[in-house]
Image (spheres, rainbow, N blue to C red):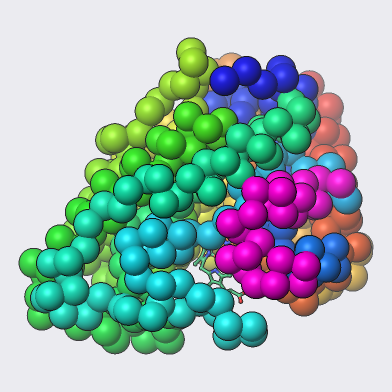
């Protein structure tokens, strides 16, 4: 597939720990309900899945935040739950209620019936990737994504969001054999799904382990990280001669940073509980770090937002090391942006990241 050449590769360079003129920034859930234009397109589409399954709508909403802000990457507009939906679990999003599965996976029979879905059922996602990549016209790179096997299993067993993860953890402790079977199928499905996104035009891929951090030490390594590694081991590292960097984001995974960084990934996403300078000292010589502003900072005043951005950038420091080598930092939030965020706050944030990080590099010379 032929696409126009990339004009801004700052994000990919930071992921590969190469020098950049400034710190690149994008935001998890950057296309979403805090943008009035997103809500307008969603109303036209009728539902979240109506939006995600229509290539033109998905392309339109992916590009909306890039029209407003000088973001350094685009992320495919879709959801992590498309994969279990393709497994036949019947996904729906009731307005204001979050995701629901019509047939959750709760017993031995349901687990036995589970299989890696035919990727043809997710063709709408791959078509959206190609359409978005064309529409981007080389402006910034396009990120593809998936949920981690564990995070998908949480939704598949619980049947939706959860406060206590009681059902999924009950299965994990009582019937680890069933849990391992779900996770193995999820891992192989996620790997096929991400590879198809890469073939369709994704230039980096991110694995969201949003609920890895709810696991006990030991359980995390066994039920989450092992299966994220199983995904990573199957991913194409290159497409048409170009490297495809991977980002693994475990919300609440700060304590396990070394272990996550030791899986075969180019970058690790961290939430706001992590000090970036310490994270860099622990793992920054072999992976890039993405994060980690608290999304609630965006409810503060512009000067306070600028102050928090500066603090975050200073905690990482300039990426160049004493010995001439380079660390990598991609600025992001520590979790998805809130739907109540004032859109003007995002302008302040993005511009502050660019301006302050340029100044830090200039002062360092
Ligand atoms: O980042 C982007 O702009 C790309 C799109 C994207 C969405 N979901 C769109 C979306 C991405 C990367 C996701 C990932 C996702 N989805 C995760 C992992 C990241 C995280 O937040 O931890 C998870 C856990 C989900 C599952 C999911 N999807 C939930 C829990 C919800 C409801 C959340 C809510 O705020 O109500 C969704 C719906 C969803 N996915 C929305 C968007 C923009 C809002 C739905 C709407 O428009 O009605």
Q: Residue, x 28% and y 35% (percent of image)? A: 233
Visible in this render: residue 282?
no
Residue 168 horizontal side relative to residue 28, left or right: left
Image quadrant in which you'd find residue 70: top right
What is the x, y in percent for residue 280?
Answer: 51, 42
Residue 69 horizontal side relative to residue 185, left or right: right
Residue 112 in the image: above or below residue 324: below
What is the x, y in percent for residue 113?
Answer: 17, 66
Q: Quadrant of ligand 1?
A: bottom right
Query: Closest to the observer: 77 or 335?
Result: 77
Q: Does the magenta stretch include residue 46?
A: yes
Residue 348 horizontal side relative to residue 6, left or right: right
Dominant secondary structure of the residues highlighted in magenta in the image: helix
Query: Closest to the observer: 79 or 314?
Result: 79
What is the x, y in percent for residue 275?
Answer: 56, 56
Image quadrant in which you'd find residue 363: top right
Q: Residue, x 89% and y 70% (percent of image)? A: 301
Visible in this render: residue 36?
yes
What is the x, y in percent for residue 125?
Answer: 53, 48
Q: Residue, x 48% and y 33% (percent of image)? A: 198
Image quadrant in which you'd find residue 6: top right
Q: What is the residue that sits farthest to the top in this orientation?
A: 241
Residue 78 in the image: above or below residue 248: below
**Circle count:** 0
Query: Closest to the observer: 274 or 97?
Result: 97
> Which residue range is magenta in the image?
43-67
């Amino acid at each position: 597939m032929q696409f126009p050449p990339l004009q801004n590769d700052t994000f990919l360079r930071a992921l590969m720990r190469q020098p950049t003129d400034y710190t690149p920034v994008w935001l998890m859930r950057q296309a979403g309900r805090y943008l009035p234009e997103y809500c307008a397109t969603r109303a036209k589409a009728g539902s979240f899945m109506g939006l995600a399954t229509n290539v033109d709508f998905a392309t339109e909403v992916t590009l909306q935040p890039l029209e407003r802000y000088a973001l350094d990457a685009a992320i495919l507009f879709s959801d992590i739950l498309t994969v279990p939906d393709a497994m036949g679990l019947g996904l729906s999003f009731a307005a204001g209620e979050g995701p629901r599965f019509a047939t959750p996976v709760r017993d031995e029979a349901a687990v036995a019936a589970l299989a890696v879905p035919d990727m043809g059922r997710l063709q709408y996602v791959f078509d959206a990737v190609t359409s978005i990549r064309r529409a981007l016209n080389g402006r910034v790179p396009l990120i593809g994504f998936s949920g981690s096997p564990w995070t998908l299993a949480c939704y598949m067993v619980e049947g939706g969001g959860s406060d206590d993860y009681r059902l999924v953890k009950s299965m994990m402790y009582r019937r680890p054999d069933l849990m391992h079977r779900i996770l193995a199928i999820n891992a192989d499905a996620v790997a096929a799904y991400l590879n198809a996104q890469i073939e369709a035009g994704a230039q980096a891929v991110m694995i969201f382990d949003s609920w890895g951090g709810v696991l006990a030490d030991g359980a995390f390594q066994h039920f989450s990280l092992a299966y994220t590694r199983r995904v990573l081991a199957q991913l194409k590292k290159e497409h048409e001669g170009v490297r495809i960097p991977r980002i693994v984001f475990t919300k609440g995974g700060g304590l396990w940073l070394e272990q996550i960084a030791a899986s075969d990934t180019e970058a690790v996403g961290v939430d706001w509980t992590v000090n970036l300078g310490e994270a860099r000292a622990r793992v920054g010589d072999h992976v890039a770090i993405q994060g980690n502003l608290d999304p609630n900072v965006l409810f503060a005043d512009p000067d306070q937002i600028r102050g928090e951005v500066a603090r975050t950038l200073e905690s990482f420091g300039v990426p160049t090391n004493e010995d001439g080598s380079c660390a990598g930092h991609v600025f992001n939030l520590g979790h998805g942006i809130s739907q109540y965020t004032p859109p003007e706050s995002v302008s302040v944030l993005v511009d502050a990241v660019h301006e302050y990080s340029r100044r830090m590099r200039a002062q360092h010379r």
